[in-house]
Each structure stands twice: as structure tokens, then as C-alpha cells.
Image (cartoon, coloured by chain):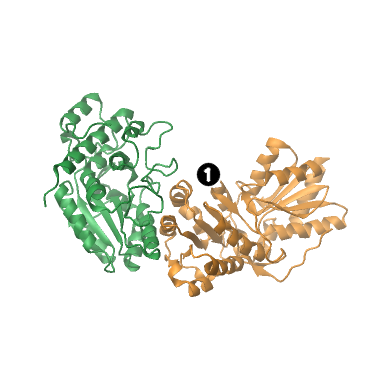
Chain colours: A green, B orange
């Protein structure tokens, strides 16, 4: 499958948005944001069936929930570039009186966001609730969600995973960003998650793996495959291997940039590696 | 003096259950969730009549709160149901982030609140839940006094948009408010007019306050009794109007003295009309096993304790 050059270009531009947002307030989480850029671009520009305008209930369209809310710079960039709010609003990220809070929130009425996230481990439960609402509404559209691998250490996830398998929530596609890193180090050192696939399968999930989650074709193919597996009595899980900090050489393969902003020189280097494609905000 | 008649002892949780039955029939957007306590919450009829609108989540309250938040996205009105302890302290962050901060139309319905769940003891007797819930911005906190009022409150919260904490209990208590009296969120109910002292009470202690007022009347003390079924938003006007007449107040609740109704009332008085206040509440301790009556007596939450508090506050008024 070949992608339009536009989508590849968009990923690069989204990386620039992430880096510039985080740099401008010297805070935020570039690592995981960069790692999931291909996933979220594919989701919002190729996979999801979206209505033109935002409403909270999302009836008649696919709905996405971000559980690992700290990758808000990515979420905001993709939402803005998908037209949910003006691109220039990215300049208000994490600033006083902004709708772009440090972690996503509905409180300020930012279009595209349906639940606050940031305190980890809660998004899958919310996604399940929205999936149940879709079934009650006879709405055939799907619920998508994204979770960090580290946040699976929160027990609530396993309540939700058990529920979704047991109750056959088969209109849900939950993707786990398996970058293997968390704040204090590699996930397998901090608290080993082990092999996630058999764990999810043991709870009744249909699981597929995307080995190169930073390849636009690979993640698009994986998401399309996941769609074909919905409606068959099992929730669908995608274990997506990504590289934290992808696209910026000195940010890759380390947890050091999980929650740290680049300085001026580092930003310049990072932007050089990702030349402007669709225009900066 | 007004007299109130017990129409027959009933548990407030049955008021919730019967309210849910009615809502099931009248409001197709209402969904019930429960964490393995269907019988205790009295929602069997709702489930029998609308199995498709019931979500059994198992013993997983955190997941229940998240699912409830998600159900609102799609236009449903989820009513979560479990014990008060597991409805609040156990899931505080889930409520805070996904329900309160996210302004979701979830009704958190909590039975077995306070000491009067009895023999199960302190692990289950939460006395901090009103405080926890009232501190959350945007949360409405309701603690009705009897079966009829709990049923009416259950119906009322479905019509109110926004997160609500609805607190009720296990024991069979006097049922004395009129059947089908409309429940107005945030509007205190003047039960007994009086001139010497204001007694504000919530939940099970409203009936105790009425008993105390009757006894006080016989001793020549005119007590005004107000049912504060909504702790947040608090009907400050009703409290101030009463205290500006009586000049002193006793607050009564089946809750820790810290963080409950009494403190909300104190704040109102301090800001607008400073007056002596006595607190009938649990004095910053956990509960223990015992019958509801024994516990209310030991922890000073019954009509006798209210009477004592009234004499104390009258002395302070001078």
C-alpha cells in the first residue's frame, strides 16, 4: 500500500508542532508524542469515519479516546490540522487561559476532546462506556483508544480488559503504544509488563501486533486489519511497537525525553531533521 | 406544633430502587450500573424490565466510574450503584478526572452510607463521603431523609444535568415525608417552625431532629427544624433566614464532623451571620460493629444527642 506523500509530509509537520509547542513553554512530553505521530495521523486522516463538526456525543461517527493524556502535544497538533480548532491556537499550549491544557480536558470546551486524561489508566473504561453507548444507540461506528504501555501498570486497565472480553465489547479497537519506556526507565525494569499479547488473549481479546508502529503503511495496514476483526464478539487490541522520540535522532531509544523540553539549540537540530512541510502554526 | 407520622419504616435504598423502577419506565436514556450489589441497591425490577440498560461491572468500581463517564458520550444518563464507601473513597480520582472535571452527567448513587449499615463495621461505614464529594467542583451532593424523599430525589437527579452524588442508607427508618412530594435540588425544607434554635439536619438524622424538637417543645423550647437534603449547593438563604430569627444553630449528620454539612453551614454563618453552632456528628473517628441504634447512641447521633446539643447552644447564645 502506498501512501500519499501528503500524509508522510503531515507526520513531519506534526513532529514540528510537537517540538515547537513543548519548547515554547519549556514543558510537556515530546517522547511519547513523537512515537505515536504516525498512528494518530493515520487514525485521523485515513482510518476514522468522522463528521465534519464536533459534538460531544459523537453519534454517527467513529470516536477516539486518548488515555495517555501526556502526549497532548501530538493530540492537539492532529486535532488542529484535522480542523477541529484554529492551528494558531497551538501557540497557547500549556499557557494561562488556554483551551490547550497540559493534559487534555473538556473543561475549557476544546473541540475534539471528550474526556479529561492524564491521571493514567482510566481511558479504557471510558472507551468501553462509549462503546456500550454506541451499541445502545444502534450506531455501527467504532471506538478507538490509545494507551501507553507503562500505564498498563494501573490496575483499572485490567478491570477494563476483563470487562471488555467478558462482555464482548467488539466495537472497540484499543491500541497499546509498546515503546518499552516510562519515566523511571525501561518498562521491563520498572515493573515488567512481559508479553502483552497472551495476557490480552487470555482475557478474550483478539490481538494483532504492528511491529513497526512508526511506519505509516504498517500502522495503517494494522488499523485496517483491526477494523475487519470488529463485530465478532471480541474486543480488538493492537500492540504497536514504537520508538519513543521517533524522528529526532537524539530523542530516540531513551526515556530521557519522556517529559523534557528541548532547549533552543536542541530544538534547532530537531527541526533541521524535520523540515517544514505544510507550514508551521 | 406540626406533627409528623411515620407511614411505616422503610429503607432509603428501597426509595432509590423504586425510583429506578420508575425511571426505567419513563426515561429511556437512564442506564443502571452496579458493582456486584444488585440486591443491596434494590434495582432488581429495573434490571428485570430493562436488561439491555443494565451494566453489571463486577467488583470493579474504578472501571464502573469510567464506563459511566463513557456512557454519557452517546447521550445516556448512567446511575452507578454500590455502597457509599466504594462509590467515593475507592474511586476518588476516577470521579475527579472523568466525571467531575469532565462534567459528565453521571449519577453516583451510594447506599449503606454512615454508621447505620451496622454490623459490617468501619471498613464499610464511610463517614467522609460528603466531604470528599462536596469538595469536587461542579458536584451536587444530596442526602435525602426517608424512603419517599429518596425516591423523589432519584427521579429529580435524572432531570438535572451534571454530576450528582446521591447518598442513602441501609436501615429501615421512619417514612414521614409526603408521598410524591416534588424534590427540588438545593431547596431546603422547613419542617418545623420555631423561634429559639435552628436545627438543620440531613439524611437519617432529620427524623431524629423532629423527635428532639417534640421533646424540646414539651420543655418549653421552640426549635425550628430544617431538612437540608442538598448539601451542595447549600440553601444558604433558608439557613440565614432561620438563624437571624433564632440566633443559634445545631447541625446534625451521620458523617464526620470534619468536612460535612456542619462545616458548610459554619462557613455560611461566618460569612453572613456569625452565631453559636453545635455539631451533632461523628467526632473525627471511625465507626465500629453494632446495631444501627446502638451506634447512633454511642456516637451521639440520635434525638437525645440533638437535645443535649440544643441546650448547650442555647446556653452559649445567652
Q: Nearer the viewer, residue A117 or A60?
A: A60
Residue projecting furthest to the top = A265
Q: Residue at x 26, y 54 (%)?
A: A175
Q: Residue at x 76, y 58 (%)?
A: B210
Of the 4 image quadrants, the one containing the N terminus of chain B is bottom right
The subunit letter for the residue under badge 1 reads B
Q: From the viewer's perspective, is A249 left or right of B273? A: left
Quarter occupied by residue A28? top left
Q: Residues within 10 Å of mark 1 (few under 14, many from 20)?
A: few
Q: Nearer the viewer, residue A10 or B42?
A: A10
Residue B59 position within the rendered picture, expressed as x and y whole percent measured from the top left: 43, 64
Q: Is residue B288 at all visible to an observer of this figure? A: no
State whether residue A186 is above or below residue B155: above
Residue A143 position within the rendered picture, expressed as x and y whole percent measured from the top left: 32, 57
Q: How many labels, in total?
A: 1
Q: Residue at x 41, y 54 (%)?
A: A57
Q: From the viewer's perspective, is A1 left or right of A158? A: left
Residue B13 position within the rendered picture, expressed as x and y whole percent measured from the top left: 59, 66
Label 1: which residue? Answer: B137
Amino acid at each position: 500500500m502506498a501512501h500519499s506523500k501528503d500524509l508522510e509530509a503531515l507526520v513531519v509537520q506534526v513532529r514540528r508542532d510537537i517540538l515547537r509547542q513543548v519548547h515554547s513553554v519549556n514543558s510537556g512530553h515530546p517522547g511519547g508524542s513523537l512515537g505515536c505521530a504516525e498512528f494518530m495521523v493515520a487514525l485521523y486522516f485515513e482510518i476514522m469515519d468522522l463528521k465534519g463538526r464536533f459534538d460531544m456525543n459523537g453519534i454517527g461517527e467513529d470516536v477516539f479516546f486518548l488515555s495517555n493524556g501526556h502526549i497532548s502535544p501530538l493530540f492537539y497538533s492532529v486535532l488542529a490540522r484535522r480542523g477541529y480548532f484554529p492551528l494558531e491556537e497551538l501557540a497557547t499550549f500549556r499557557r494561562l487561559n488556554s483551551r490547550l491544557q497540559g493534559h487534555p480536558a473538556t473543561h475549557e470546551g476544546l473541540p475534539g476532546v471528550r474526556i479529561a486524561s492524564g491521571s493514567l489508566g482510566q481511558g479504557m473504561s471510558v472507551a468501553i462506556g462509549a462503546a456500550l453507548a454506541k451499541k445502545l444507540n444502534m450506531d455501527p461506528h467504532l471506538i478507538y483508544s490509545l494507551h501507553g504501555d507503562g500505564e498498563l501498570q494501573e490496575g483499572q486497565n485490567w478491570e477494563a480488559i476483563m470487562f471488555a472480553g467478558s462482555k464482548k465489547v467488539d466495537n472497540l479497537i484499543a491500541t497499546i503504544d509498546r515503546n518499552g519506556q516510562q519515566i523511571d526507565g525501561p518498562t521491563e525494569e520498572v515493573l515488567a509488563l512481559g508479553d502483552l499479547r497472551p495476557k490480552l488473549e487470555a482475557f478474550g481479546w483478539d490481538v494483532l501486533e504492528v511491529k513497526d508502529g512508526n511506519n505509516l503503511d504498517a500502522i495503517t495496514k494494522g488499523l485496517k486489519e483491526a477494523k475487519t476483526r470488529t463485530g465478532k464478539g471480541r474486543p480488538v487490541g493492537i500492540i504497536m511497537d514504537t520508538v519513543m522520540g521517533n524522528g529526532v535522532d537524539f530523542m530516540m531509544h531513551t526515556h530521557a525525553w519522556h517529559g523534557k523540553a528541548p532547549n533552543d539549540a536542541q530544538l534547532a537540530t530537531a527541526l533541521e531533521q524535520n523540515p517544514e512541510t505544510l507550514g508551521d502554526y | 406544633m406540626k406533627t409528623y407520622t411515620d407511614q411505616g419504616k422503610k429503607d432509603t435504598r428501597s426509595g432509590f430502587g423504586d425510583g429506578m423502577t420508575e425511571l426505567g419506565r419513563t426515561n429511556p436514556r437512564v442506564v443502571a450500573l452496579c458493582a456486584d450489589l444488585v440486591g443491596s441497591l434494590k434495582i432488581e425490577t429495573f434490571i428485570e424490565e430493562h436488561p439491555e440498560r443494565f451494566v453489571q461491572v463486577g467488583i470493579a468500581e474504578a472501571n464502573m466510574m469510567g464506563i459511566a463517564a463513557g456512557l454519557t458520550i452517546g447521550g445516556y444518563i448512567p446511575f452507578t450503584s454500590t455502597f457509599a464507601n466504594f462509590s467515593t473513597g475507592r474511586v476518588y480520582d476516577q470521579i475527579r478526572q472523568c466525571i467531575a472535571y469532565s462534567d459528565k452527567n453521571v449519577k453516583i448513587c451510594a447506599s449503606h452510607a454512615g454508621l447505620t449499615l451496622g454490623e459490617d463495621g468501619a471498613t464499610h461505614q464511610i463517614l467522609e463521603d460528603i466531604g470528599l464529594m462536596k469538595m469536587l467542583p461542579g458536584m451536587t451532593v444530596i442526602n435525602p431523609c426517608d424512603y419517599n424523599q429518596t425516591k423523589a430525589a432519584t427521579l429529580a437527579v435524572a432531570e438535572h444535568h451534571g454530576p450528582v452524588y446521591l447518598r442513602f442508607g441501609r436501615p429501615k427508618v421512619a417514612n414521614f415525608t409526603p408521598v410524591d412530594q416534588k424534590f427540588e435540588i438545593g431547596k431546603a425544607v422547613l419542617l418545623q417552625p420555631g423561634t429559639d434554635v435552628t436545627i438543620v439536619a440531613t439524611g437519617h438524622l432529620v427524623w431524629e431532629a423532629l423527635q428532639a424538637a417534640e421533646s424540646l417543645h414539651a420543655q418549653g423550647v421552640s426549635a425550628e427544624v430544617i431538612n437540608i437534603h442538598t448539601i451542595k449547593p447549600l440553601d444558604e438563604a433558608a439557613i440565614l433566614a432561620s438563624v437571624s430569627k433564632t440566633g443559634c444553630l445545631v447541625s446534625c449528620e451521620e458523617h464526620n464532623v470534619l468536612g460535612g454539612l456542619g462545616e458548610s453551614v459554619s462557613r455560611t454563618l461566618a460569612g453572613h451571620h456569625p452565631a453559636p453552632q453545635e455539631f451533632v456528628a461523628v467526632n473525627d473517628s471511625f465507626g465500629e460493629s453494632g446495631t444501627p441504634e446502638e451506634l447512633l447512641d454511642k456516637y451521639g447521633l440520635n434525638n437525645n444527642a440533638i437535645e443535649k446539643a440544643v441546650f448547650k447552644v442555647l446556653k452559649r447564645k445567652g
